[in-house]
Image (cartoon, helix red, strand yellow):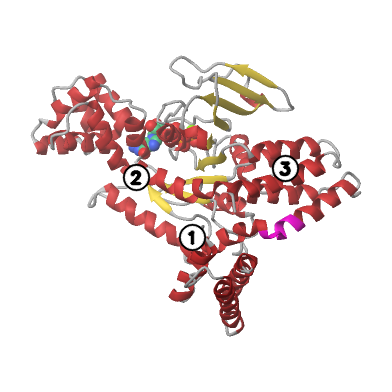
Amino acid sequence: MPASELIERVAQLIEENAARVPEPTRSEIIALERRLREPLRVAVTGRVKAGKSTLVNALLGQRVAPTDISECTRVVTWFKYGHPERLVINLRGGGEHVSQLASGGVLPRELDVPVEQVASVHAYLANTTLRSMTLIDTPGLGSVHDEYSRATRELIATDSTGAAATADAIVFLMGGAMMADELETLQLFKGGDGDGESSAANAVGVLSRADQLGDGTRDSWEVAVELAGRYAGTFRNEVATVVPVAGLVAEAAEAALLTERDVRELSRLAKLEPKVLSRMLWSADRFSSTDAPVPPETRERLLELLDLYGIGAATRALSDGVSGAVSLRQALASTSGIAEVKQTIASHFHEQDHVLKVRSALDILRRISYRGVGDGARDPGLERLRGEVEKLADDPVMHPIAELEIAHDCNVGRLELPDQMLEEMRRLFAPGSPRARLGAASNDAQVLRAAAIDGMKRWRVFKVTGATPPQARACDVVMRSFQLLLPAAS
Ligand SMILES: Nc1nc2c(ncn2[C@@H]2O[C@H](COP(=O)(O)OP(=O)(O)OP(=O)(O)O)[C@@H](O)[C@H]2O)c(=O)[nH]1
Ligand SMILES: [Mg+2]
């Protein structure tokens, strides 16, 4: 089925119902229709100072979001594709204020509007990454200013009141320890009930600041890979996977922050006696104070750009024969783990972009349809909307959403199936001809039909002979997938 058909069906439902529901719900669902045609919205979230803005810059290949050692991102900031480049500040209580990016194409540190009056900031950039996804940088959780964190929770909570302004998918930054409020936030994004049914199909974890996780005996990256693996198991109900990243190194490499001059200075360091260099890299203080042929302000700059781990990686690459800023940036990018983060976002989000968008749109419409219209009164337009949402959710055209959730449950180990059945299910859910999906010997209608019926029978037997509840749910979805192939097979 063409990907756009899913989108078109939901858009049609909205068009048919918009005029029948009261304001402000009408405007809200019309905005939801627009949203279906926009790039997927991916929010980068996590604890204060987790390195969210740094990762956003690395993903954009452009240092546009301000980063700082003091608490920095105070409002939810959307990065969207658009010309001319500009800044639109949405005000609390409605209205907007259009402004400019600061020189160098970065967000200004101070907005023209007092932060208390800002609902969100939208930066329109001519950046190709933003053609396929809108990136949302968020204030950290656990902020000393709780109102900043609250804006983040509203953005990702699936029961948020400003439903049309929520994210479709999240990249959740994790640190060396996971705090209770971080877990609660992940639960919010899942739907909050923690009943084990919700899917982590639209959330991935990134173990950030991987360069700082060294334990004195082992390399930081080694520790990070191991911890990411452990988190992926522990939080498999919350996130699809966890990958480590050294965000600062990734930002310096991807946003081309290292100049030829930096490379010359790093080459000087690389020529130092290995023991001397290695001792210098024990701590920032030692790095700044040891006698070496590099001026103090350059050392500060290098620390800020790469930190000790990045400086170590850069000097090693230079000693190994890498030369020039372009090659060094490539070498650093590959040690930072940023390619794996991009790959994770691509495979978990982009490849199922339309399914994720439709899934969140149906969820939002369903929630809206349950709203009362004051004094607990019911609105006939909303009641009708609810009926139509349920009908569409049940329509065969929406079946890929259920398939996505089941496939995901298998990927993360929440659902276990015998090998052969798992293989059969993967083939059935994959895009392709009915013959390929059924694994049939020929394209003959009788053969296809028999394969579909046979499949349904086998999964029914499995369901009624001791399947666990998650397996039984998977059986229902698989049987439906076979059933939907029957018309194609006759
Ligand atoms: N060593 C190291 N430092 C990092 C890394 N990522 C970010 N930093 C530094 O940590 C500080 C905070 O980074 P930000 O990207 O501003 O973090 P944030 O999560 O956006 O912070 P808030 O918006 O204030 O919540 C900055 O000084 C960054 O340079 C990293 O991977 N390694
Ligand atoms: Mg930030």
Query: Which element type, helix, strand or loop, lies under badge 3?
Result: loop
Mark 2 close to ligand 1, CB under 8 Å: yes
Label 1 vs 2, first from the N-terminus:
2
Which residue is under mark 2? Answer: 210
Quick one: quadrant of the C terminus? bottom right
Mark 1 close to ligand 1, CB under 8 Å: no
Query: Which element type, helix, strand or loop, lies under badge 2?
Result: helix
Label 3 vs 2, first from the N-terminus:
3
Label drawn at residue 161: 3
Whether pointer 3 and pointer 2 mark residues with C-beta atoms closer than 8 Å, the reply is no
Q: What percent of the width, then of the height, locates residue 385?
A: 81, 49
Q: What percent of the width, then of the height, locates residue 167?
A: 60, 42
Q: Is residue 270 visible?
A: yes
Q: Residue at x 18, y 36 (%)?
A: 317
Q: CA distance from mark 3 to mark 2?
A: 35 Å
Farthest residue toward the front?
444
Whether pointer 1 and pointer 3 mark residues with C-beta atoms closer than 8 Å, the reply is no
Which residue is under mark 1? Answer: 236
Query: Which element type, helix, strand or loop, lies under badge 1?
Result: loop
Q: What percent of the width, then of the height, locates residue 389?
A: 76, 53
